[in-house]
Image: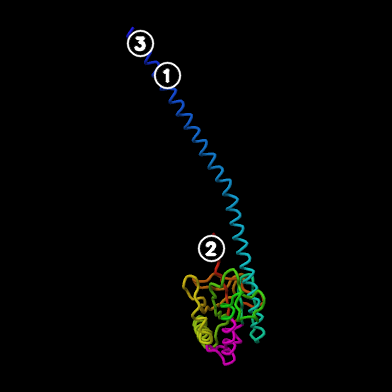
Amino acid sequence: MRRGTRAHGDDQESYFASMSDLMAGIVFIFLIMLMALSMYNIDETSAPKDEQSEKTYQETIAKLMDERARMIEALRKDLQAHQIDASADAASGTLTLPAAQFFGPDATALKPEGREKMATTAALLARYLTCKADTPDMPDMPAGACPTIAPVERVDAAVIKATPPANGLAAQTAARIQALETSAALTSAQPTLYELQGRAGLPVLTVHGQAMEQPPSSSSVPADRHHRPAPLPSAVPPAVDRLILSFTMAVPPRS
């Protein structure tokens, strides 16, 4: 009898142990299914928000590029109104000014009328770089000329020497000297251009010289390590010495 009782008790303990293991397994499976369902719901709800956020960001960038195009075109018209020849490529954000209106043939120094035009260019450039849509003391600015989304982060002025000098000076050397002359003329006429800084604390205006011995490709201009190449305006022959102003906007970060 004792042996039978012990055997019967062992069977009961084994039975209840297996039932508890089974219930624990069911609960464990239920928890896994619940977690998978919750993760699925999170993915389903976050994906549309991410897509909408990216769409909104791209729309903001498109509006910013439109603002840059309007600003550059307005600046070009202002330059033309002051008898300064300029052509614009709004898509790439560049203004091109033939260098002959500033420098004489084979000269590295600004000619007198070129210095006056450079001072006028500096005044207009400083005006456009510091204006805001709600600035009260600039009521005569063209409509839409002042950026509203983000300011200009950088203006890279590239003095391009496309024709070799006849005075024996190396083209690269001549371009660099002309770049120094251009930088000094712009910042002395408008010290604001020297003081302006972008978000990273770097100067907004940079000037460099570049020789171009061979005709460039149809879609690029030379650039230093701080500037990405930009397409040349089609209205400007590639063999003409020129000053190219490339505008880069302060693109807002993704939210």
Name the mark nearer the viewer: 3 or 2.
3
Task: Assess whether residue 108 is covered by the magenta stretch.
Answer: yes
Position of 14 with respect to 251 (left or right) is left
Give, as a single range, the part of the protein colored magenta: 98-124
Taking depth in this image into account, of 87 and 73 the one nearest to the observer is 73
First reached walking from the N terminus: tag 1 or tag 2: 1
Q: Amino acid at mark 3?
A: Thr
First reached walking from the N terminus: tag 3 or tag 2: 3
Please tell me which residue is depicted at 50% across the width and 33% down the height of the picture.
Answer: 30
The residue at which mark 3 appears reads as: 5
Please tell me which residue is depicted at 38% across the width and 12% down the height of the picture.
Answer: 8
Please tell me which residue is depicted at 40% across the width and 19% down the height of the picture.
Answer: 14
Quarter placement of the N terminus: top left
Name the mark nearer the viewer: 1 or 3.
3
The residue at which mark 1 appears reads as: 15
Residue at the extreme top of the image, as rendered = 1
Taking depth in this image into account, of 146 and 190 the one nearest to the observer is 146
Distance Cα–Cα, label 1 vs label 2: 64 Å
In the structure shown, which secondary structural element does the residue marked by tag 3 occupy? helix
Q: Amino acid at mark 2?
A: Pro
Q: Which mark is residue 253?
A: 2
